[in-house]
Image (cartoon, rainbow, N blue to C red):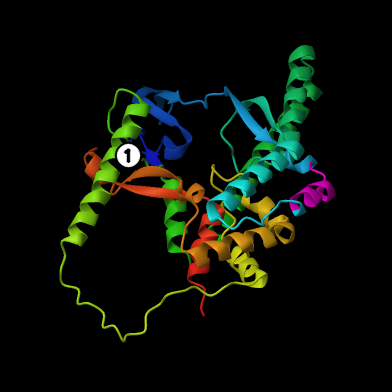
C-alpha cells in the first residue's frame, strides 16, 4: 500500500510492539531515526526524528500565446485567405507555414510572464482552497485575541479542513482506479505512483547538454547508415517479373477523406507545430482545402515535404538498470501533426 513501518523494538512492558510509526513513501517524509524513550505508563515514548521534504517553490520565465482571447470570426477569415495554388510541394508547404505563422502572430502574439511553480495536487480543489483560507483567517484571529470561542471555531474549521482533504483524496483515487478499469498499463502506473516508484530516464555523463545531444545524433545517424548498408548487401530478394502488376500511384483524396483522417488522429501537438492541434481541429473547415491540396500534391509527386521531415528526437533507455551507454538508448521521435496526416493518407484504401 506504499506504507513503511519504522518501529523495530518493544513499546510495551509486556515486550510487545504495540505503538507504530508509519509513513507514506510518496509524500517525502523520511524517518531519520526511531528509538525507544522512557516508560511513562505501561507504554514507552517512541522518539522519532523525521526529515520532511518540502516542495521547492521556484519561479520560471515562460512564453505563451493567449488563444482564449482570439476573435474566432477574424481568425477564421484570415485562414480562408491562405493561398494554395503552388504546384511544387515544398513551395506550397513553405507558403502555407509562412502565412499561418503570420496569422498566428497577429491574433495570438507570443507573450512572456513569470510563474510560481508548485507541484500540482489532483485533490486540491477550489472548495479546499476556500476552507484553507478560512482556516488561516480563523487562526490569525485566535492568535491575536486568544479568546476561547475563537479557539473553538478555529478547531472546528481545522477538523472540517482535514476531513475534506481526506474525502477528496479518496474520491480522486477511486476515480483513477475506476477509469483504469480494463487498462492494465494505466493501473500499474497508478500503483507505481502510490508506492513511490518513479520512472526515470537517466542520461550518460557529458560536458554539457549540447555535447550530449550531438553524441546521440551522431550515434543514431551511424546506426541508420549501418542498417542501410547491410540491406544493400542483402541479396536474397528475387527480381519481380516484368508482367507483374506493380503499384505506381496513390489515390487522390477528397476533403471528406482528409477531414476523417484528421478527426481520427489523437489531439497531440509537437513543439514544432505552428498551430496547436486542438486549435487546428477547431478551424478545420477553413484549413481543409489547403491541407487537402498539400496531401494530394505530396502523394501525386511522390515527395514528402522537406519542412515536415523534422522531428523532436528524445533518447529513452531501453530498460531500467542498463548501463548508461549510447547503445542502450532508443530514439523516440515526436513528429509534427500534419506530417502524420500525410502518412495516414498514404495508407488510405483504394
Q: Start and end of the magenta stretch? A: 70-79
Q: Disc 1 marks which residue?
A: 217
Going 77% across and 23% down the picture, which residue do you hit?
A: 137
In this view of the protein, which residue sits in the foreground, 159 or 280? 280
In this view of the protein, which residue sits in the foreground, 329 or 349? 349
Quarter where residue 338 is shown: bottom right
Going by the picture, which residue comes out furthest to the top?
A: 144
Picture coordinates of residue 286, whole percent (x, y): 74, 58
Picture coordinates of residue 265, whole percent (x, y): 57, 62
Q: Answer left or right for 302 relative to 263.
A: left
In this view of the protein, which residue sits in the foreground, 283 or 157? 283
Residue count near mark 1 (Cα–Cα under 10 Å), binned few <14, some 14–19, many ≥20: some
Picture coordinates of residue 259, whole percent (x, y): 65, 67
Picture coordinates of residue 14, whole percent (x, y): 32, 37
Is 160 in the magenta?
Answer: no
Going 60% across and 56% down the picture, which residue do you hit?
A: 267
Q: Answer left or right for 287 relative to 72.
A: left
In this view of the protein, which residue sits in the foreground, 100 or 87? 87
Q: Is residue 178 visible?
A: no
Relative to 107, say whether 87 is above or below: below
Q: Is residue 55 visible?
A: yes
Is 71 in the magenta?
Answer: yes
Q: Answer left or right for 4 relative to 129.
A: left
For the stretch drawn in magenta, the main secondary structure is: helix
Mark 1: secondary structure: helix
Relative to 47, say whether 331 is above or below: below
Quarter where residue 196 is shown: top left
Going by the picture, which residue comes out furthest to the bottom?
A: 243
Relative to 61, say whether 94 is above or below: below
Amino acid at each position: 500500500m506504499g506504507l513503511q513501518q519504522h518501529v523495530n523494538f518493544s513499546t510495551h512492558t509486556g515486550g510487545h510492539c504495540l505503538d507504530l510509526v508509519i509513513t507514506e513513501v510518496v509524500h517525502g517524509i523520511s524517518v531519520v531515526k526511531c528509538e525507544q524513550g522512557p516508560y511513562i505508563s505501561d507504554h514507552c515514548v517512541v522518539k522519532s526524528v523525521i526529515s520532511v521534504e518540502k516542495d521547492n517553490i521556484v519561479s520560471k520565465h515562460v512564453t505563451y500565446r493567449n488563444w482564449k482571447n482570439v476573435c474566432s470570426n477574424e481568425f477564421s477569415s484570415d485562414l480562408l485567405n491562405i493561398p494554395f495554388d503552388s504546384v511544387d510541394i515544398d513551395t506550397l508547404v513553405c507558403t502555407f507555414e509562412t502565412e499561418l505563422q503570420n496569422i498566428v502572430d497577429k491574433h495570438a502574439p507570443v507573450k512572456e510572464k513569470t510563474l510560481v511553480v508548485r507541484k500540482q495536487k489532483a485533490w486540491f480543489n477550489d472548495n479546499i482552497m476556500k476552507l484553507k483560507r478560512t482556516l488561516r483567517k480563523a487562526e490569525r484571529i485566535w492568535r491575536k485575541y486568544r479568546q476561547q470561542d475563537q479557539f473553538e471555531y478555529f478547531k472546528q474549521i481545522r477538523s472540517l479542513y482535514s476531513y475534506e482533504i481526506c474525502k477528496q483524496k479518496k474520491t480522486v483515487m477511486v476515480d483513477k482506479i475506476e477509469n483504469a478499469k480494463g487498462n492494465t498499463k494505466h493501473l500499474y502506473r497508478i500503483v507505481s505512483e502510490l508506492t513511490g516508484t518513479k520512472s526515470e530516464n537517466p542520461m550518460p555523463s557529458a560536458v554539457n547538454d549540447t555535447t550530449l545531444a550531438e553524441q546521440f545524433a551522431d550515434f543514431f545517424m551511424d546506426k541508420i547508415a549501418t542498417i542501410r548498408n547491410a540491406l544493400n548487401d542483402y541479396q536474397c530478394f528475387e527480381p519481380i517479373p516484368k508482367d507483374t502488376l506493380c503499384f505506381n500511384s496513390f489515390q487522390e483524396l477528397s476533403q471528406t477523406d482528409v477531414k476523417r483522417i484528421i478527426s481520427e488522429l489523437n489531439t497531440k501537438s509537437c513543439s514544432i507545430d505552428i498551430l496547436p492541434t486542438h486549435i487546428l481541429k477547431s478551424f478545420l473547415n477553413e484549413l481543409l482545402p489547403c491541407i487537402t491540396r498539400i496531401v494530394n500534391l505530396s502523394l501525386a509527386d511522390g515527395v514528402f515535404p522537406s519542412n515536415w521531415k523534422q522531428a523532436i528526437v528524445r533518447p529513452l533507455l531501453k530498460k531500467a538498470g542498463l548501463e548508461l551507454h549510447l547503445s542502450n538508448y532508443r530514439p523516440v521521435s515526436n513528429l509534427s501533426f500534419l506530417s502524420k496526416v500525410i502518412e495516414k493518407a498514404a495508407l488510405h484504401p483504394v
